[in-house]
Image: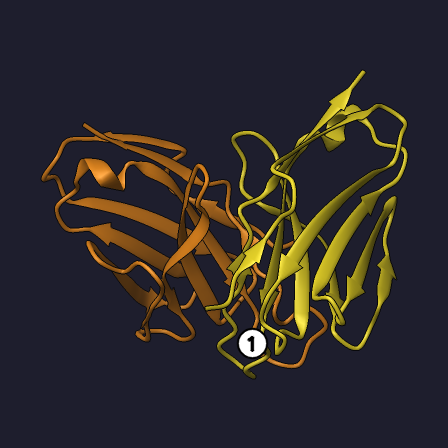
């Protein structure tokens, strides 16, 4: 079974703080993704990475950065947290190649972040 | 621009009945579709997928139907159970041989009435 884990289920931070959200997958997947999920807006892609040290902006990258130093780990960084970044953050991974499920993304449990 | 959406934001179904959740997509180039289930407080969980060269695919108690003519996708859940209560998302992508990004719908909340 694919396992995607996220470092925290709940986080409370103050405006202006630097926030790190960690994601680890154990299936040797090449692709990793960070989304945020808000009511009525669904899942929106923040950043994704298709290889170590590679990153691509998603649909809403402003206010975020990412780091992929190791294949299994993809970090989302909020340089200076703001209240509008209060959200559920979901990490996902997918394999690269011609396998049967190569486009399917597998999700972690999510981190619910509250910025005060 | 492309969009993936759902006809109904909420659906209530009697336990034991069948349910149908619908999804419309606008990108005619999309060639791969996935249904996810998200229970309260959890991340989305893969249910079933279908490629554009298929019209129907069946899993355990679930069936996905794809109508490319009208760009419509549906998820049928047979003999619903309380554990089926969740938000269901469709997602679509265009195969790009490596850097696939999924576009998600906003979700339908399915409630099973005992």
In this rendering, the answer to whether A106 lies above or below A30 is above
Classify residue B41 as left or right of residue A70.
right
Give the position of the N terminus of chain B as an image quadrant: bottom left
Q: Colour of chain A?
A: orange
* Coloration mode: by chain
In this rendering, the answer to whether A114 lies above or below A71 is above
Q: Residue at x 53, y 67 (%)?
A: A28
Q: Colour of chain B?
A: yellow
Is A98 or B51 nearer to us in this picture?
Answer: B51
Residue sitting at the far front: B70
Task: Give the x, y percent position of residue B73.
Answer: 73, 58
Q: Residue at x 40, y 75 (%)?
A: A51
Quadrant of residue B9 within the rendered picture:
top right
Task: Give the x, y percent position of residue A75.
Answer: 31, 56
Chain letter of the residue carrying label 1: A
Classify residue A82 as left or right of residue A108.
left
Classify residue A104 as left or right of residue A87.
right
**Secondary structure under the numbered disc 1 in the rendered image:** loop
Q: Residue at x 52, y 80 (%)?
A: B98
Residue sitting at the far left: A16
In this rendering, the answer to whether A68 lies above or below B17 is below
Write down the residue under mark 1.
A96
């Amino acid at each position: 079974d694919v396992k995607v884990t996220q470092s925290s289920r709940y986080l409370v931070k103050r405006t202006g703080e630097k926030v790190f959200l960690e994601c680890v997958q154990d299936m040797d997947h090449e692709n990793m993704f960070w989304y945020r999920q808000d009511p009525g807006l669904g899942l929106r892609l923040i950043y994704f990475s298709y290889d170590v040290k590679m990153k691509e902006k998603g649909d809403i990258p402003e206010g975020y950065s990412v780091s992929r130093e190791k294949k299994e780990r993809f970090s989302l960084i909020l340089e200076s947290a703001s209240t509008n970044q209060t959200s559920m953050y979901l990490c996902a991974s997918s394999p690269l190649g011609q396998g049967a499920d190569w486009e399917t993304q597998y999700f972690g449990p999510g981190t619910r972040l509250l910025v005060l | 621009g492309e969009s993936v959406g759902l006809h109904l934001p909420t659906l209530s179904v009697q336990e034991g009945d069948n349910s149908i959740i619908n999804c419309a997509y606008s990108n005619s180039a999309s060639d791969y579709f996935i249904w996810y289930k998200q229970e309260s407080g959890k991340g989305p969980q893969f249910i079933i997928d279908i490629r554009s060269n298929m019209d129907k695919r069946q899993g355990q108690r679930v069936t996905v139907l794809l109508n490319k003519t009208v760009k419509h996708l549906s998820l049928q859940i047979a003999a619903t159970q309380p554990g089926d209560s969740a938000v269901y998302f469709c997602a679509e992508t265009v195969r790009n041989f490596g850097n696939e990004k999924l576009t998600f719908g906003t979700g339908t909340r399915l409630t099973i009435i005992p």
